[in-house]
Amino acid sequence: MHKYGDCSFCGGEVKCEKVEFDYRYKEKLYIFKDVPAGVCQQCGEKYLTAKVAKEIERRIQTKEKWDKTILVPIDVFSEGITA
């Protein structure tokens, strides 16, 4: 088990958990389930080890058949709406 240290955003305790992780690559959205990650118990920030991040990239580049595919609605804000 990896020791993550404290959260770099809020200083909260980071614990190992299995999470759902969204990853965007070349204008596509990939969703990975049961990813081992560090999760801040205070703010929810997620941390990946280099090994896990490399495995995600490897799967995106080499996997031919995915377990499931879903449609994701996309909306573009129209003019007239300001921050």
Image (cartoon, rainbow, N blue to C red):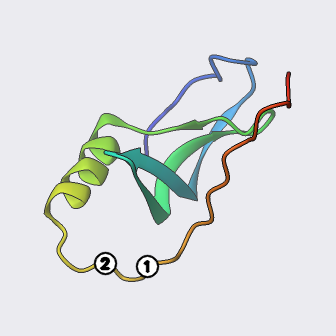
User: Is residue 53 depicted above or below 81 in this figure?
Assistant: below
Instruction: Farthest residue to the front: give it.
Output: 79
Residue 2 appears at what percent x and percent y? 43, 39
Image quadrant where residue 9 sits: top right
Residue 34 appears at what percent x and percent y? 50, 66
User: Is residue 38 depicted above or below 83 in this figure?
Assistant: below
Residue under the image location 38 percent in, 37 percent down: 49
User: Is residue 5 depicted above or below 77 in this figure?
Assistant: above
Is 52 on the left-hand or right-hand side of 1?
A: left
Amino acid, disc 1: Thr
Residue that badge 1 annotates: 69
Is 2 on the left-hand or right-hand side of 19?
A: left
Circles 1 and 2: CB atoms closer than 8 Å: yes
Residue under the image location 51 percent in, 53 percent down: 22
Amino acid, disc 2: Trp
Q: Quadrant of the C terminus?
A: top right
Residue under the image location 52 percent in, 54 percent down: 21
Residue that badge 2 annotates: 66
Residue under the image location 85 percent in, 30 percent down: 80
